Amino acid sequence: MASRRADPDLVEYLGRILLRHRLRIGAFLGILLLGTLATLNTTIAPGGDPANARRMGAPEALYHTLKLFLVQAEGLSGNDLAGYVLWAIYFIAPAVSVGLVAQALEAVIHSPARQIRRLRGHVIVAGMGRLGSAALESFRAKGRPVVAIDRDHDNEIIAHLRVEHQPYVLGDLTSTAILDRANVAQARQFLAVSGDDMANIDGATLAKRLSGGACDSVAQITDPFLLTNVQGLLEEHGIRVFNPYEVAARQVAVRVREKLATRTGRTAVVVAGFGKFGKMVARELLTANGTKGRRDPVDLLVVDRLPGMDREWRSFAVMHGLPRDGLRTMVADVRDPEFWERMAAELRHEFSVVVIATDNDSSNVTTALLVQRHLEGEVFLITRLFRSVAAVEKDVHGIGSLVFSEVALEALMAEADQAK
């Protein structure tokens, strides 16, 4: 007969419980040792008859010390130091016992594995990064049962869930064992939002298969090339895809188009940064959402310090059916003040639009301030921020901010609400 293996999550959880209450456990063991030593140096009188008093061996001394934790002190005498120690233990030990028993019951009752096994129709959020943790809190605020998955033992969100006795699973979201521990067979929805696109695809596919197709699976894919190639295949298997950069870029394009609608004449639009977000912004600006179809000409320029950007743009344009000559590219550091001085001389338009789209908030804020300092004339400035920053939120100092985390979360929750 095969032996039953211990649940790794339960073992890990109990280990952390022991570590958290190490002082109380240490007190218990210390009292037990002290009581045993004291009992070895005193006498016990069974039946209360002094004539039967005798010293005990170590096993018997340990046994009688344990009885003190249960408020039993039969035959205990107190005419010497050892006796006084035992009487003190007699009153202290029960309190320690009650505390340990309470902690043991709490550990069993609030075990994540126990909670997860009882769930039905829950949501699994795999990947406790900034977006995943925000989604987790949003589900909890709505009162929906949710299980978190992350492979990092030291993840801040996992540590918080551990303290609050909330369900979580530690491990790889592409592992069958991990998804089984998350009770994916009974889950209503699986959201794969880790920072690894391939892991998200594998995890969402595995969740769909393990649930027999019943679990609504959503995979975050941020690489536009990968998304273009796999989206159709995944959707054929009932897996929806989600690109937060695409959603945010559409909002940027709408803002730019609305602003351009109020202006006439030639306009320059500069996209600073050509990473995942910058690519999607450029794409959206060249479609009906952005500058396409505008009667007055628009000069679209994309700037990044990475070499080979022109070649990368041509590949991106071909893949997405965009005109390869729809924009200019320039290799430069957008945080360099001299670059914006040169741009001020080149951009002689009465009105300019600058979208700052690098993947670093501090770089974006720095660049925004440089744009304000060096570009003359009227400038419509949009800065991508992952989280709200007091200095630039609500268009303070003339900087229009797009809080990426809020836009991405809103879109992700909209995807989640589409689950049947």
Image: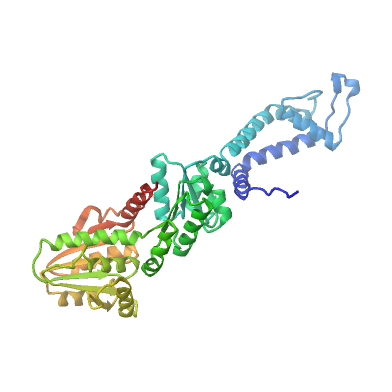
Q: Looking at this rendering, what residue extends furthest in the front direction?
A: 236
Which of 156/327 is in front? 327
Which of 233/27 is in front? 233
The reply, left or right, for residue 54 in relation to residue 123 is right
Which of 393/129 is in front? 129
- At horizontal 22% and vertical 75% (from top left) the residue drawn is 326
Provide residue 329's location: percent of width, then percent of height: 26, 77
How was this image coloured? rainbow
Res. 290 image quadrant: bottom left
Provide residue 89's location: percent of width, then percent of height: 71, 30
Quick check: 399 above or below 377? above
Res. 397 image quadrant: bottom left
- Residue 238 appears anywhere in the view: yes
The reply, left or right, for residue 18 in relation to residue 283 is right
Numbered marks: total: 0
- At horizontal 41% and vertical 66% (from top left) the residue drawn is 230
